Amino acid sequence: MEVESRIPGYSFIQEWLKNIFSRTIRVSDCGPKHVGFIMDGNRRFARKNDIEIKEGHEAGFQSMSKILELLYESGVQSATVYAFSIENFKRSSKEVTNLMELAKDRIKQISKNGELASKYGIKVNVIGDLSLLPEDVLKEMEHAMEITKNNKRAVLNICFPYTGREEIVHSIREVIINTKDSKEINETLIENNLYTKDQPPLDLLIRTSGVSRLSDFMIWQTSHKGVKIELLDCLWPEFGPFRMSWILLKFIFKKSFQIHDEEEDKKNV
């Protein structure tokens, strides 16, 4: 995790700089509107620091909260986090149980008054095959979605449990149910039935832990032209606002040059 300084007033200065930075990103109008995260490395972080796996996942949640605060303050409209893959059910029963308990606690924390959802006007969407969840966990997820459903400022998609292949299968099933003529089925219909429908297209995908694969996450969305993918060597709990800020700056720099080049091309036509 990013180390906090013991210098007096450091937290105040850090918050002040974050506010200035996020305001600058918003004003630029070149920042990403939809960011996806493969939050990999919690277990390795736990082993690296000789702590229990549960504590590694807890550290990962703390990193996620700080990153999301920065993004929403910077004008991001949708954030999608890969919280639990359908494949994760193959892990030990103890770890799965711990993850389910952590999910229940944290979804309450995200959605209750004064926390992330209320502070930033965030609508919580839990996406994936919810039929696989234990009843008590499903109940908490549904409650979080219900109490935040009228929030309009931004969206937090929590993929739990999820795979990109399952999302595409889900979309195709919806299309078949609602389409009388198979000849009408096209890419647009499939896209309009994904879990992320009615949200901005994915602009930026970030994966931690030094692994160069998508791990079955948003495979339809990442196939679009223009999606920027950042693969980082650090473990997820080690990823914090400073690294995120650098990535946002790079994104804006490239986007501004792209816009400039497009405008020049129009002039030369």
Image (cartoon, rainbow, N blue to C red):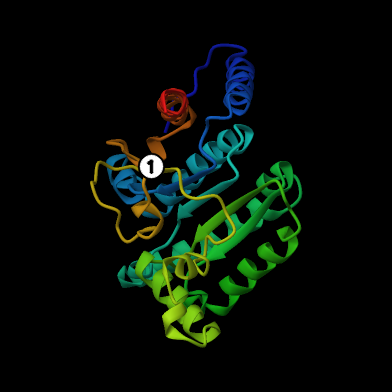
Amino acid type, callout 1:
Gly
Q: Residues within 10 Å of mark 1 (few under 14, many from 20)?
A: few
In the rendered structure, the answer to whether residue 94 lies left or right of residue 212 reads: right
Q: Quadrant of residue 218?
A: bottom left
Say above or below: 137 vs 179.
above
Say above or below: 115 vs 131.
above
Residue displayed at 35% across by 69% down: 165
- Between 138 and 220, the one lying in front of the other is 220
Where, quadrant-wise, is the N terminus in this rendering? top left
Q: Quadrant of residue 136?
A: bottom right
Residue displayed at 55% across by 62% down: 197
Residue annotated with mark 1? 226
Say above or below: 242 vs 84.
above
Residue displayed at 58% across by 73% down: 138
Q: Secondary structure at mark 1?
A: loop
- Between 255 and 22, the one lying in front of the other is 255
In the rendered structure, the answer to whether residue 42 lies left or right of residue 201 reads: left
